Image (cartoon, rainbow, N blue to C red):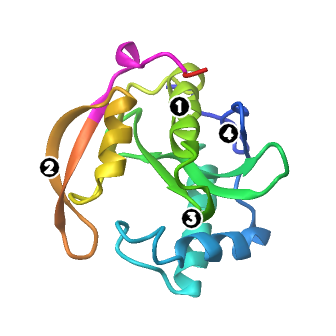
Amino acid sequence: MSQPAPDSHPPPSNRLAFRTWQESDADLAISLWTHPEVTRFLGGPSSPQAAIDRLHLEIHRQNQFGVQYWPIFLRSNGTFAGCAGLRPFHQEPAVFELGVHIARPFWSERLGEEAARAVLDFAFASIHARSLTAAHAPQNHHSQALIRRLGFHYSHHEPWGPDAILHPFYRLEPSATPPTAP
């Protein structure tokens, strides 16, 4: 696996631009991770301080591993649309977990899929990930459908979150990556 530069991120997709989180992004982090609908399957809304702590965690991951759940913006007008990215998966070398959190106003526009495909391409082409994993809350059928459209295959269940609820996990190998959608 290639170690990405500390400020690396996926290139723009058709409608989205990526960048790294900055300390000055506290308002964006709070707007995303305190929203009850956005965080419904992520353990519920965070407090503003917990959202800022998550922002700092993402900045730390970028500095340490060269990946994070990068903030995404509409290319047409620069509006913040959520985040999508990678984080190291357990202690497995060159294996990352894919995640996408889309701001509520942009649901049903398939921005999550577009962002996820850009992240997949970046993971396999730029940092040469060995494998990717993804998970969803058992009741989150929209995330399950997205994970399957991306070409992931079920691998196992494992406890996740403070309540250790069993979540299904999926894997994707570089050779199984579906072509990027137009």
Mark 2 crowdedness (10 Å alpha carbons): few <14, some 14-19, many ≥20: some
Q: Amino acid at mark 3?
A: Arg
Which of pointers 3 and 2 lies earlier in the amino acid sequence? 3
Badge nearest the viewer, 3 or 2:
3
Name the quarter where the C terminus is drawn. top right
Residue 149 found in image quarter: top left
Please report whichever mark, 1 or 3, sits nearer to the chain's N-terminal start. 3
Where residue 134 appears, as percent x and y from the top left, is: 34, 43
- Identify which residue is drawn at 29% across, 57% down: 140
SS at mark 2 in the image: strand
Report x, y in % for residue 159: 18, 61
- Relative vertical location of residue 4 with respect to residue 161 in this rendering, above or below: above
Q: Pointer 3: what residue?
A: 104
**In the figure, residue 58 lies in which quadrant?**
bottom right
| Mark 4 vs mark 1, CA separation in Å | 13 Å
Q: Secondary structure at mark 4?
A: loop
Residue bearing mark 2: 157
Question: Counting other residues with Cα less than 10 Å from the Cα at mark 1, is it few (<14), some (14-19), or many (20 or more)?
Answer: many
Q: Gap in Å between the C-alphas at discs 1 and 2?
A: 24 Å
Label 4 is placed on what type of residue?
A: His
Q: Residue at x 64, y 70 (%)?
A: 29
User: Disc 1 and disc 3: Cα gap in Å?
Assistant: 20 Å
Q: Is residue 172 magenta?
A: yes
Q: Give how far apart the Cα atoms at labels 3 and 2 are.
A: 28 Å
Span highlighted in magenta in the image: 171-180
Residue 84 x/y as whole percent: 55, 48
- Residue beneath label 1, please? 117
Q: Which residue is mark 4?
A: 9
Residue 85's place in the image compared with 11, above or below, is below
Tag 3, which secondary structure?
Answer: helix
Q: CA distance from mark 2 to mark 4?
A: 29 Å
Residue 109 counted in the magenta span: no
